[in-house]
Amino acid sequence: MHFSLAQGHPTGTTIRRQVPVLVMMLTLASASSAWAQKVTTVEDLTFEQTLVQLANPLGLRPIGESIGLTTALEIATQPLSSASGGMVFKLDPATGLLTRVSRTLGPSFAERALTAGEGQVAIAAAFSSTSYDKLSKFGLNNLPLGSVTASNPANARVGTGDFHLTSKTLTMAGTVGIAPKVDVAVIVPLITATLEAVTTQVDGNGRLIRLAETNTKFSGIGDMAAILKFKAAKLPGPEIPDPGGLGFMLTMRLPTGSRENLRGLGVYRTMASAIFSAGKGPFKPHASGGFEFWSKSVDVPTATATGGLVKVRHQVLFAAGFEIEAHPKVTLLLDFLGQKIRKGGEVGVVSDPINAGGISSIQSLVDLPEGILKGILVPGIKVNLKGKLLLSLNALVTVKNNGLHSKVTPVVGLNLGL
């Protein structure tokens, strides 16, 4: 795929070659204001290539790659709904009957120490739809991509973007109890990201110099997850009802999602986490925390001339919340999810001094070595519709996110024990 670049010139010439960023900026700075450019996408570019063509000509640094990295980090590390079975039954030695172990139906995004039990199988699906409104501290509808500071207004430039970016994720999961205290699960996310964007560049007199636009959709599998969960200890008391306890979980994220289309990170990620849950009655708190090791860093260039890189690697995750039994078939949920992605992901504007053609500096939006800190509040409800079929309704409410930010993401899910 390529961008066709049509100049506002009587010949309508089409240019299809790459031009070094600095040369392009100096050329634009000395061009006539009547020489406006219009750039539109055609099919076959990847998501990242599309961002590069939209944004990179507006600054001196790799703007598109930086936006792409932050987008990929958000999509690939979004919270996955819990793969654990919601309704767990075990043989009650006191009665000789199968009895529901927990009065509540389990968390939706956090974890509890309780396992499904040997031979138990559950399948689940969840759908979420996210609209993003900010990139770090900048609004996506008026994103400052790059600018040129010059003594002559005709040589000055301001480049901005109006981005409408959404993602939809369908996750499918399956859980099997392979031993009384051991579960294995697989989660497969299917992701569709849509980008409608217009970038413009105007000179110091307000005249349009360049316009680029796209309306594209990218769909496919994301980074799959394989999970091993082990209940290490239980709190004092009989197993029915479950008194809670301590568990451990190992989660591996496989690089099955396309890094070029921002559905994955292109690295193996392994998270080891500890889980605690408690409570025999209608109120059951739970908490978990873990460290995710990445097989290698996810790199993005930050300076074309010097070869500078931001190398993002590893993250810390934690969750805490509670379940409340509102009715034997209804559980109310509230969780807080936290993430810390290390060593990159936040974007900011960087200025490069230039002494050519009356230009004093060029500003560009690029990735910074500061990591991403996320805090998400998740209220929700689970309802036992019939038998072992559960419906869950949740909302991911962003409290803090200095990467690619969204306000509220609704999530609906189904869980069926077989």
Image (cartoon, helix red, strand yellow):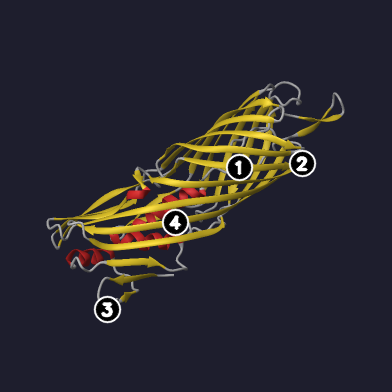
Residue 9 quadrant: bottom left
Find the distance from the CA under tag 2 to the CA under tag 4: 41 Å
Residue 119 quadrant: top right
Residue 60 can be seen in this image? no
Labelled pair 2, 4 in contact (Cβ < 8 Å): no
Check disc 2 and give the amino acid type.
Gln
Q: Secondary structure at mark 4?
A: strand
Q: x, y (%) of residue 236?
A: 71, 21
Q: Which residue is mark 3?
A: 11
Q: Is label 3 or label 1 in front? A: 3
Q: Earlier in the sequence, mark 3 or mark 1?
A: 3
Q: Is residue 264 left or right of residue 231?
A: left
Q: x, y (%) of residue 166?
A: 47, 51
Find the distance from the CA under tag 4 to the CA under tag 3: 31 Å
Check disc 4 and give the amino acid type.
Leu
In this view of the protein, which residue sits in the foreground, 376 or 231?
Answer: 376
Q: Earlier in the sequence, mark 1 or mark 4?
A: 4
Q: x, y (%) of residue 269?
A: 54, 49
Q: Is label 2 or label 4 in front? A: 4
Q: Residues within 10 Å of mark 2 (few under 14, many from 20)?
A: many
Q: Which residue is mark 4?
A: 195
Find the distance from the CA under tag 3 to the CA under tag 1: 54 Å
Q: Residues within 10 Å of mark 3 (few under 14, many from 20)?
A: few
Q: Earlier in the sequence, mark 2 or mark 4?
A: 2
Q: Secondary structure at mark 1?
A: strand
Residue 320 can be seen in this image? yes
Find the distance from the CA under tag 1 to the CA under tag 2: 23 Å
Q: Secondary structure at mark 3?
A: loop
The dot on residue 395 is: none
Find the distance from the CA under tag 1 to the CA under tag 4: 23 Å
The dot on residue 120 is: 2
The dot on residue 412 is: 1
